[in-house]
Amino acid sequence: MHPYSLHSYALRDGHGLPHDPIPAILGPRPIGWISTCDADGRLNLAPYSFFNIFNYRPPLVAFSSVGKKDSVRNAEATGEFVYNLATRNLAEQINQTSIEAPPGVNEFELADLTPVASIEVVPPRVAESPVALECKVTQVQQLASLDGTTLNTWMVFGEVVAVHIDRTLLCDGIYDTAAAQPILRGGGLADYFQVLPQGRFKMYRPR
């Protein structure tokens, strides 16, 4: 056995720590910077740290929102959204778009970002972001707890139907994750991480 000195607790008793450790343990997490529009064409842009890809073919991505926010309502109403890569040089603007703004506020304008027309969906992508995935909604699911209680948390799944990649991020045709300098959400109140080239190592699956 490893000589760990463990802090163990049952969730019903609370963690007894200054801040919930679970989001930090399950991190750093990719940030889903999601652009949508409502049925009237009004734009919305917001970051979600409950985000990831869940299938190869077809590629399915999903973001989860605590509270049925504009991104969820818009994606549900129009059936479309766009994922924009959150990068280090855009961190401050990404943070600005996390504001709890009233419906109808255009976060593109708020953060001085440029909407660019997509090719397969109506919501625009963020011109300043080097990567974007256009998505069509496949599911919108309200989550539930162990006892069956429905939560005020919503997960939106989308199938990727178009991709935009800055050519400088393609090295001999292979996407260079570190070159894009993505940022990821850590734990605590304000912890983020940046993917850097020196953190890379290779490990191949055993055959």
Image (spheres, helix red, strand yellow):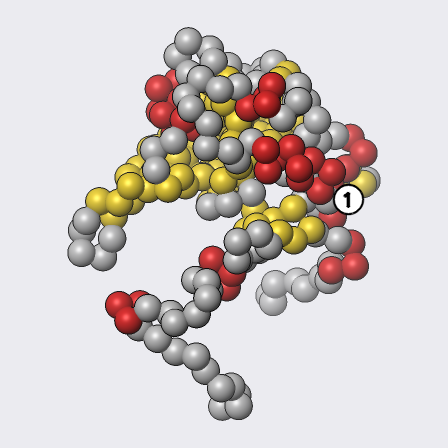
The quarter of the picture where residue 141 lies is top left
* Residue in the image at 18% along x and 51% along y: 148
Mark count: 1
**In the depicted structure, whether residue 198 falls above or below residue 31:** below
Q: Where does the image place residue 85, in percent across and percent down from the top left?
A: 63, 36
**In the depicted structure, whether residue 92 falls above or below residue 1:** above
Q: Where does the image place residue 50, in percent across and percent down from the top left?
A: 46, 46
**In the depicted structure, whether residue 95 falls above or below residue 26:** above
Judging depth in this view, the residue of 97 and 39 nearest the camera is 97
The quarter of the picture where residue 109 lies is top right
* Residue in the image at 42% along x and 9% along y: 40
* Residue in the image at 59% along x and 23% along y: 110
**In the depicted structure, whether residue 166 falls above or below residue 149:** above
The quarter of the picture where residue 87 lies is top right
Residue marked by disc 1? 179
Judging depth in this view, the residue of 66 and 100 nearest the camera is 100
Q: Amino acid at mark 1?
A: Ala
Along the horizontal axis of the image, is 4 left or right of 196?
A: left
Q: Where does the image place residue 161, in percent across and percent down from the top left?
A: 52, 25
Would residue 176 be seen by someone viewing this image from the given angle? no
The image quadrant where one finds the C terminus is: bottom right
